[in-house]
Image: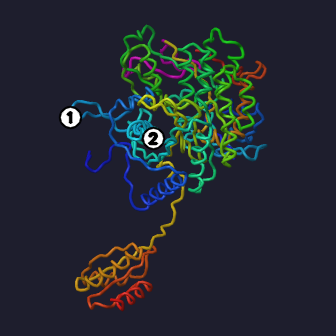
Amino acid sequence: MRRQLERPHGTRDFALAEMAHRQYIESVVLRECGQWGYTPVETPLLEYADVFQQGVHEGEEERLYRLFDAHGHTLALRPEMTTPVARLAATMLAHEALPLRLSYSAKTYREQGQRAREAAEITQIGIELLGEGSADGDAEVIALMVGCLRRLKVEDFRIALGHVGYVRAVLSVAPPDLREVLTAALMERDIVAYEEALSARTAEGATSADLTLLRALPRLRGGAESLAHIRELACTEEARAACAQLEDLFAALSAHGVDEWVHLDLGLYPHHEYYTGVVIEGYVATMGQRICYGGRYDELLARFGRSVAATGCVFHLERLQEVTESAPVTRPLVHLEYERASRAMALGFVRDLRLRGYAVCATRVGEEEALSAARTADGKNGIRRGLLTADNGTLQGDELLVQMFAQYATRE
Amino acid sequence: MLTIALCKGRMLDTVVSLLQTVGLSPSEDILDSRQLIVSDSTHADVRYLLVKPVDVPAFVQYGAADLGLVGKDVLYEAGADLHELLDLRSGICKMAVAGFAGTDIARVHRVATKYPRAAREYFRERSQQIEVIDISGSVEVAPLVGLADCIVDLVETGRTLAENGLVILDEVGVISTRLVANRSSYQLRAKEIDPLMDRLRKAVTGSSANLPVAMSSREVTA
């Protein structure tokens, strides 16, 4: 195997049009985040593995890429950004005024599971809103995600809302071992396994109302109107509190004007243990995987010594690439070729063009090449081509370029 | 347009009759036509894709179909990223370990199967590491020619086993057809999927009179 020519499994190269597309998406999303007052942050690609033990689910821990530093400490490539940003907010930014609005665009790494569901290397573009514990914080994050998707001209999408507090309250009537099986089934979205586990075991001490709700849980969903029904089913204080939060959230979403894209799905239960409240998953038609996901994690920062309410959401750039069209390149591009004898004149002209905002390639050519270049001088792919020949003063090629050169030559 | 992926082959008739009990009506010729995309005679916005069973999970996961009806055996092997919504309780058969009578499962080393994941998981539960030989058909021949100590395979009537001098050594589990959904369709097309899922659920779990034809017509014997 000629490994020197290959990339590690699950990684990719990007270039040319594809890279331009990535940069376009990144700039649109980060610009929208900027308009909501989010400022970019950067954290190291490497962290101490201990950092991620604060946030990652057990099964995910196995998928960390680990290595050792010279002192034998275990390091890990970051598998996600929320935990490093929480660490940053609890340390370097500990004395910054709240709420903090942070954004990032960063590569993350996760060893592929046995079932290769996604790439090992993923670019995450996301936001974290720290110090805003009310439903307005959750609503802001959702509205911003909707805003980004619409800026990218993605229209056919849906944000599903869950609430891990509600789920945990409902599952609390089940004994711990059953609860574990039910939780795992919810994470996999395997309703059949969930129901099988329920019918095989009886939750002792649970009332029939508890059991009705337990059975219905993975299928509880609908628009804001379904909240009334969901609240009726709620039998614990925690579940009712979750319903009140969801109600407040829907009111805030409607004030943001984004409620038409959002619906409830209380069977939603993400893989991360750090979530404490509202959780979010966004889906776009034609793509089976989530386009964005996130939620409230009010207890994560306390593990780094700063107790602050927090919520956030993240896009996978590679998935956004699949559902968006690349914007047409709008920057002007000029390709100017020159012979050695006309170098000074050519590079002076090029300097002038760049100052005026043109992107210019300048390439030196030999005499024979010059002739062939002259033949293809008419603009290809929107590129303005020109050839400055040795007799210092004549430029052949694109009309506008010829004009600009004439002006430049007079000025000089 | 709601696209439903169905398995070509012997299970198709039971699946079609199940769909009919919930008010869908795949075109008459679905059973003997060679067409791979079939419309619904009463619902203009529903169509069916006929694909090989092993391919149903991929068609659904990647969104070529919104829903799929497929056996748990195939689903488990595929390990696809999708929603498993409902046990349709049709297409029921057993997955079993089979071999020569008297074979001691605890001493088995090599296992031939079409279901490597299920086989490994079964033996792993018994703290037994085995070598799986992944073959795609005529699994029963493997013990006869010394390729494997036993096999893990689906057993419907047990006739093939008997004719090759093999017996069931242990049952791995019961397999049935499942309703699965693409994760995105599940959210974006909730309004179409939820009522259909409810009707199917009622048809499947309702009174015995409502049980799908599959339950009564298909003998489940070893």
Instruction: Classify mark 2: helix, strand or loop.
Output: loop
Give the letter of the chain under mark 2.
A
| Residue A64 visible to an observer of this rendering | yes
Closer to viewer: mark 1 or mark 2: 1
Which one is nearer the viewer's eye here, A26 or B3? Answer: A26
Q: Kindly identify which residue carries mark 2.
A: A118
On the image, which quarter does residue A305 sit in?
top left
Image position of B84 (left or right of A273):
right
Q: What residue type is disc 2 on?
A: Glu
The circle drawn on residue A70 is: 1
State which tag comes first along the sequence, 1 or 2.
1
Give the letter of the chain under mark 1.
A
- Work out whether A400 lies above or below B94: below
Q: Which residue: 55% across, 36% down?
A: A295
- Work out whether A95 lies above or below B172: below
Q: Which residue: 32% across, 39% down?
A: A46
- Work out whether B167 lies above or below A233: above
Neighbours of disc 1 within 10 Å: few (<14), some (14-19), many (20+): few
Region of the chain picked out in magenta, as a range: B145-169
The circle drawn on residue A136 is: none
